[in-house]
Amino acid sequence: MRIIILTHDNDRHFYFCNKIIKSTDQVVGIITGAKNKKLSNNKKRKIYKNHFFLILRNKLLNLIFYNSNKKLFDEKKTQEKLFFKNEKSFFRKNYKELILAEYSDAHDSINDDYYVSLIRRKKPDIILVMGTCLIGKRIINSAKHVINLHTGLSPYYRGGWTNLFPIINKDFGFFGVTIHKMSTGIDSGDIIFTQRPEIDISDNYSSINCKAIVKGVELMIKTIELIKQKKMKSTKQWTKGKLIYGRNYNGFIAFLYFIKLKKFISMYKSLQDSRLLPQLTLIENGIKNDH
C-alpha cells in the first residue's frame, strides 16, 4: 500500500501525519499547506459581489466583538498546544524527507496541475486528507481510496466550525468526527466511521475539537487496516444536515459561545452520564447504529 497525505501546516495536522506514518510505515509523500488558496481578482470580485452585505456585517461584528473573537482564538491555541505540542517540530526532525511539496502562491491551490502531477507520479493506493481546501475530481481520481477526516458529525454538521455551532444551536450530542470517502461536495461523501468524544465538565469547544481529532486519527488508522484487509465498508449520507461556511462565523458568534458554554457543557455532561443524549445515527465501518 502506498499512502499520500494532503494536509495543512499546524501542529494538529502534523499530529495526523506523525501518527499515520508511525502506524503504517507506508506513507510515500505528504503535501502541506493544502488549505491555502490563491484567489484571482475576478474570483475576489465575484465573492465580494455575491456576499457584500454578509462580508460587511462580519467585518463590523468582528470589530464590535473583537475581544470575544480574540478570546476564542486564544482558547483554541491553548488547547491545541496541550494536545499537539511540538508535533510539527517532531515531524521536521524525523520525517521531513516525506514532504513532496509545501503550498506556495505560485499555484492556485492543491488542485493545481503541479500538485496533481506530484501526487500521480507516486501512484498512491490511498490518499488521506485532513484540513485542506475543497479537493477536485482529478485528485479524487488519483487513487482507489481517497479518505477525509472531518472534525464534525456528518451528515448532521458539515463544513467548518462544526464542533462549535452545536453549542451555539444547543444541539446536544452533535459533537464528533467523521471519516468518509472524499467527494466533490463539502464533507458529503460516503461515511466509513463517525464517533462522539467523551465530554468532561471542564471541556470547551477547543478541547472537544482536539478530542475529535485524536479520535479521528484512531479511526483513520483503523480505516487503513480495513482497506488492507479488503473489509472497508461505507454508507451514503441520508440527510443534508447543516452546512456551516467560514462566512457563518464572526465575532458575535464567539460572544454567544462564551455566554452559552458553561451551561451547555453542564447540561451535556448530565445527559451524557445518564445516557439521555439525543439519539443519532452513528457509523461503524459503514454500518448504521443508533446512539
Image (cartoon, grey):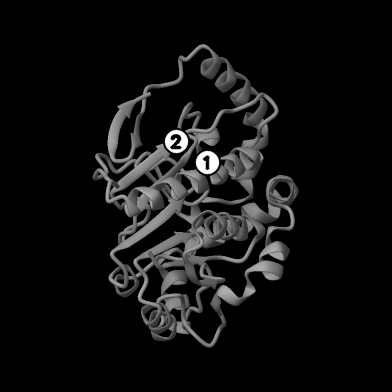
Of 244 and 287, the residue lying toward us: 287
Position of residue 258 in the picture relative to residue 185 (left or right): right
Mark 2 or 1, nearer chain start = 2
> Residue at point 57% right, 15% down?
270
Q: Which corner quadrant holds the N terminus?
A: bottom left
Name the image quarter holding residue 16. Answer: bottom right
Q: Is residue 176 left or right of residue 97?
A: left
Q: Residue at x 71, y 62 (%)?
A: 90
User: Residue under circle 2?
Assistant: 195
Crowding near pointer 1: few (<14 within 10 Å), some, many (20+)? some
User: Residue 54's spot in the image, x, y percent?
Assistant: 49, 58
Residue 171 located left or right of residue 95: left
Q: Which mark is residue 215?
A: 1
Secondary structure type for disc 2: strand
Q: Quadrant of the C terminus?
A: top left
Q: Are marks 2 and 1 in contact (CB under 8 Å)?
A: yes
Tell me which corner region of the image, top left, top right, bottom left or bottom right, holds residue 75: top right
Residue 77: x, y in percent?
72, 51
Q: What crowding class fits label 2: few (fewer than 14 Cα within 10 Å), some (14-19), or many (20 or more)?
A: many
| Mark 2–mark 1 distance (CA, rounded to whole Å) | 8 Å
Which numbered circle lies on residue 12? Answer: none
List x then y, in percent, for residue 245.
45, 54
Residue type, numbered disc 1: Lys
From what the image shows, is residue 248 above or below residue 38? above
* Residue sitting at the far top: 274
